[in-house]
Image (cartoon, grey):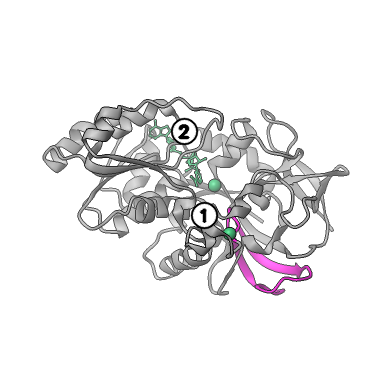
Amino acid sequence: MKSQAAVLWEPGRPWEIEELELDAPKYGEVKVELAASGMCHSDEHVRDGSVPVGLYPFIGGHEGAGVVTEIGPGVTSVEVGDHVALGFIPACGRCRACATGKSSICDLGAHLLGGHQISDGTARHHVRGQGAGIQCLLGTFAPVTVVNEASCVKLTKDIPLDKAALVGCGVTTGWGSSVYAAGVSAGETVVVLGMGGVGCGAVQGAALAGARHVVLVDPSPFKREQAKVFGATHAVASIEEALPLLHDLTWGQLADKVIITVAVADGALIAPAMSLVAKGGTCVHVSVGDVTATDTSLSLFDLTAMRKTLKGAWFGNANIRFDIPHLLRLYMEGQLELDAMITRTYTLDQVNDGYEAMRNAENVRGLILY
Ligand SMILES: NC(=O)c1ccc[n+]([C@@H]2O[C@H](COP(=O)([O-])OP(=O)(O)OC[C@H]3O[C@@H](n4cnc5c(N)ncnc54)[C@H](O)[C@@H]3O)[C@@H](O)[C@H]2O)c1
Ligand SMILES: [Zn+2]
Ligand SMILES: [Zn+2]
């Protein structure tokens, strides 16, 4: 079938709208007509080249939800007409990670940036006669896609699919970074650095877990104002401003948990972020940037003597088949705010406008509607 897609021809260029020729799903694959795609910063990292991918042209997008319109042979977990959210990391259910409840590091994640289908290493998507890669095995910058069954999470039909798109990456990543990776518990003081889709999930996770103080740090006045809507108790522009505030709020004990969700991972930010962490506290690193970077500022004495923990989190250490329906249930019951996260909506051909707004910190989340 023919459709359209927002394609990257090489790093550094903008997304370009091209005609998409889409094959039928093969073994274990599912065709999904998407309702919407969220616009996560990780696609911007692909566009600017800090995260390299395996196959150009490359169709962006990894926050999607829609309706199954065709299934390939061997598919057992979804059928035509089912509503699905797409997890940005597939979960096979059988590898060592999946079998121990850590499906965000499923072995199938090895294929994540290769661009090809997991089943046979070929492409179902074609642009100008060439096989096209798809971001995170999904390629949601197109109204229709073919993905592996391992990426699909079946939903009840009462859930609005545009909101379901958001939990495929950003919201769940942030939420899980607070609730699972940091293990925020009632009465704690939490700092979240960065208020995009991911930070918004982290703020909400911390607030719902019962944090006493949720301090949002973001240089953007718009984001600081938005943070209050999602449960932040305080919002400041910098770590330098956060430090005296934390001293006052906690009688000098500082933050039990610090979650880093800034736009671009930066090793120079680690030592300042760790300076906000209380004795025995934890800092969770979520941001992505130049994948080749290895330099990090860190006081090893502070880490050791203050018994601090610094850890990474991938998809908030969540499990797609539990957490996607779980968070959407919280949304349906009014405990998780997704509507207000969508600052603006776009058509597919406005995708570069959406990323311009992201670079200017004007959107909590931009959403492409199909
Ligand atoms: N680990 C994972 O599983 C995972 C999943 C999704 C996204 N990510 C990464 O998380 C990061 C956030 O993604 P997003 O889509 O929310 O991005 P976004 O661009 O929508 O939001 C980032 C926010 O960080 C703010 N910011 C920039 N520098 C800052 C600083 N020094 N201090 C405080 N705030 C700062 C910006 O103003 C912006 O509001 C990106 O690097 C993205 O690639 C990681
Ligand atoms: Zn993402
Ligand atoms: Zn697995």
Q: What stretch is highlighted in magenta?
A: 64-91
**Residue 80, magenta (yes or no):** yes
Q: Earlier in the sequence, mark 1 or mark 2?
A: 1
Instruction: Name the image quarter holding residue 11.
Output: top right
Rendering coords of residue 224 (x, y %): 34, 40
Mark 1, ligand 1, within 8 Å: the answer is yes
User: Which residue extends farthest right?
Assistant: 129
Residue assigned mark 1: 104
- On screen, residue 31 versus residue 201, left or right, reads right
* Residue 300 image position (x, y, % from top left): 30, 29
Residue in the foreground of this view, choosing between 95 and 87? 95
Considering the image in quadrants, where does the N terminus appear? bottom right
Identify the residue at image location x=56%, y=32%.
291
User: In the image, is 212 to the left or to the right of 57?
Assistant: left
Residue holding disc 2: 265
Nearest the eye: 87 or 197? 87
- Looking at the rendered structure, which numbered label has been put on residue 311? none
Mark 1: which amino acid?
A: Ser
Q: Which x, y percent locates residue 237? A: 32, 32
User: Which residue is found at the position 24% from the left and 39% from the top?
Assistant: 307
